[in-house]
Amino acid sequence: MPYSEEMKIFSGSASLEVTQGICNHLYEKQGKATVGRFSDGEVAVQIGENIRGKDVFIVNSTSIPINENLMELLILCDAAKRASAARITLVLPYFGYARQDRKDRPRVPITAKLVANLIVAAGANRVLALDLHCDQLQGFFDIPVDHLSGDVEFCRHIQQSRDMENLIVVSPDTGSVRRAREVANRLEVPLAIVDKRRPKANVAEIMNIIGDVSGKRALIFDDMIDTAGTLVKAAAAIKEHGATDVAACATHAIFSGDAIKRIDSSVLDEVIVSDSIPLCAEGRACSKIKVLSFSPLIGEAIKRIHGEKSVSILFQ
């Protein structure tokens, strides 16, 4: 039986598979909505069923092509608001523009706040996000935000599938230390840190390894993999410092540019990612990349939000 007849779940183009996984977990049918394009490229949306007074969840990752998927999300939200939905929750398996979250140089925008404002203006009542680039992004929204962490799912998978002996968690940079430390504590293994200098965007130079990785099985933890330049260089540096093998976990597999080719030709033994962003054909064909479904986690969070129950209990 469906969890509730008052819940409706819709999907944008970027999250059809994860949305189907969510619906399967909840024993719900995916809501009927047509998402297309006019001849000039404008996004065309029509919700194909009555949602008046319903608790509506709209799932879409603002991944590549990011602007197209963002507009789909906003327009679906506007359509639901004008169809008199009782509450609209935008479910963001991946929140794009999150890296531009402060003015770190003169005359640059804070696009994370801009996109948060657009989401509120579109009529969203709540946001459910998975592994935001930084926790403070929750404060950019003027509506409630439920922030899911994939660490529990990754740790559960690692404990079930890998030998924990001589395992060490590695943070790929100082910005990811807090998350890597939490994962290391959860797995009860030591922590190492890659110290790097980034001369310009998407270019990383590895400088040093803080901690002893010699003879250890290294596991790099991060929230996303974009061009994979940092990841591949970090893995090489860890290997040079004596690690027996190197694997990586990251929630968001952006994989822009030559990322997949870099991973395939690197010293990395395995890269575990979630299904927050759909993999391209090249990514699915890469033997080093393993996808872990987070649909049950997101589905359980949706169930709890709908039932007005605690979401934080999922991470205990």
Image (spheres, grey):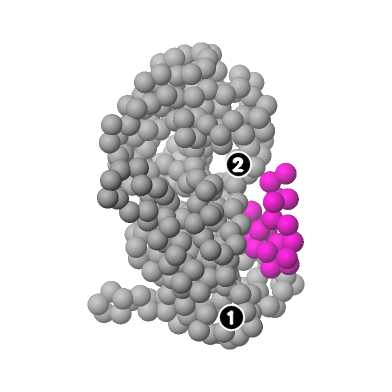
Residue drawn at (59%, 30%) of the image: 181
Please provide the residue range marked out in magenta.
296-316
**First of labels 2, 1 by sequence position:** 1
Find residue 214 and name its label: none
At horizontal 48% and vertical 80% (from top left) the residue drawn is 79
Determine which quarter of the picture holds residue 157. Answer: top right
How many numbered circles are shown? 2
Residue type pointed to by label 2: Asp
- The residue that mark 2 highlights is 151
Residue 245: give x, y in percent of width and height: 49, 22
Q: Is residue 289 magenta?
A: no
Residue at point 32% right, 31% down?
198
The quadrant in which residue 194 appears is top left
**Residue occupied by mark 1:** 85
Q: Secondary structure at mark 2?
A: helix
Q: Residue at x 40, y 61 (%)?
A: 114
Query: Would residue 57 be found to the left or right of residue 46 on screen?
Result: right
Left or right? Give the position of 312 relative to 274.
right
Q: Nearer the viewer, residue 46 or 149?
A: 149
Disc 1 marks a residue whose amino acid type is Ala
Tell me if residue 308 is in the magenta stretch. Answer: yes
Q: Position of residue 149 (x, y in %)?
A: 60, 47
Q: Residues within 10 Å of mark 1 (few under 14, many from 20)?
A: some
Locate the N terminus and report the quarter of the image it occupies. Answer: bottom right
Please tell me which residue lies in front, 230 or 275: 230
Secondary element type, mark 1? loop
Alpha-carbon distance for marks 2 and 1?
33 Å
Quarter occupied by the C terminus: top right
x and y, in percent, of residue 29 in the image: 62, 73
- Which of discs 2 and 1 lies nearer the camera? The answer is 1
Residue 89: percent from left, percent from top: 57, 68
